[in-house]
Image (tube, helix red, strand yellow):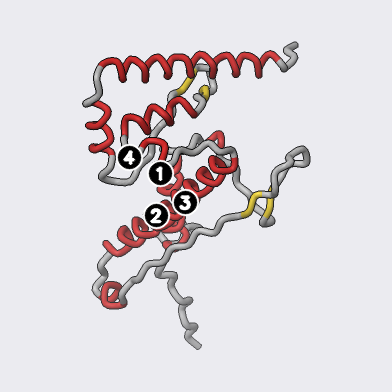
Amino acid sequence: MTQTPPRPSFYRYLHTEQESLDSHIHDQIRIRLDERRATLLDERNVHRYRHGDRWATEASDDAPSMMHKMAAESIIHTIDVINHDTAIIERYIESMVEQLFADLMQHLYQTVGEAAESYGNTITRNEHKGDIPVGFLTMLQKIEFGVNRYGSAQRPSIHMAPGQGTKFIKALQAQPNDYHLKVETTSLEKEKRAVAREAARISRFRWE
């Protein structure tokens, strides 16, 4: 009696039987999303939680952090599959990455905004009446600079809505030299304070 041959695995690559098309696509989404996130967040500061929905250290007085859900969806038309339109794979990957990254950024801005408001470290429109240079200098005077892994001061980055960057830069460039001198003087003072804080922090550790 003739045996029926086993059903072929249509969605596996020839070079390996361990990697399916589905797993390859999901790996590509993860890799590309990680690459985009790395442009904003240092990978050394990224923590991954595998289990549970809350996380807090024993010494922390803060409320436990909540896990944030990210979701994305994409439509693949049957006719494209029938027509062997392989471009849908790339469109699917990019669509998922764009949606997940947008969700990540929304959550990031929301978290930063809530933290800033809790400490009163915010600037309202009433403080600068819509004047960009005044608002920028007020912001610069209110924040503190950080340091990198080598202890060198780092100036902060500004994130704004698309299309606002050109207007923002032009408004600052149009200011007189006295304004730019004040901005630079303030920045240098912030850098010195950041380095001093880091030196004081390191001095609390015992080195053997």
Give the camera-side residue of 139 and 134: 134
Q: CA distance from mark 4 to mark 3?
A: 29 Å
Report whether 3 appears left or right of 181.
right
Crowd rating for badge 4 (residues with CA inside 10 Å; few <14, some 14–19, many 20+) = few
Depth check, mark 3 against mark 2: the one in front is 3
Q: Amino acid at mark 4?
A: Gly
Mark 3 closeness class: few <14, some 14–19, many ≥20 residues within 10 Å: some
Amino acid type of the residue tagged 2 in the rendering: Val
Query: Residue lying farthest top?
Result: 208
Quadrant position of the C terminus in the picture: top right
Q: Earlier in the sequence, mark 3 or mark 2?
A: 2
Which residue has dot 2 on it?
97
Q: Position of residue 20 (x, y in %)?
A: 46, 61
Rendered image: mark on residue 104? 3
Callout 4 touching callout 2 (CB < 8 Å)? no
Q: Are marks 3 and 2 in contact (CB under 8 Å)?
A: no
Q: CA distance from mark 3 to mark 2?
A: 10 Å
Q: Which residue is mark 4?
A: 130
- Whether pointer 2 and pointer 1 mark residues with C-beta atoms closer than 8 Å, the reply is yes
The mark lying in front, picked from 4 and 2, is 4
Q: Find residue 34 and report its horizontal and vertical position in percent.
A: 46, 45
Q: Is residue 37 above or below residue 12?
A: above
Determine the secondary structure under disc 4: loop
Q: Which amino acid, mark 1?
A: Arg
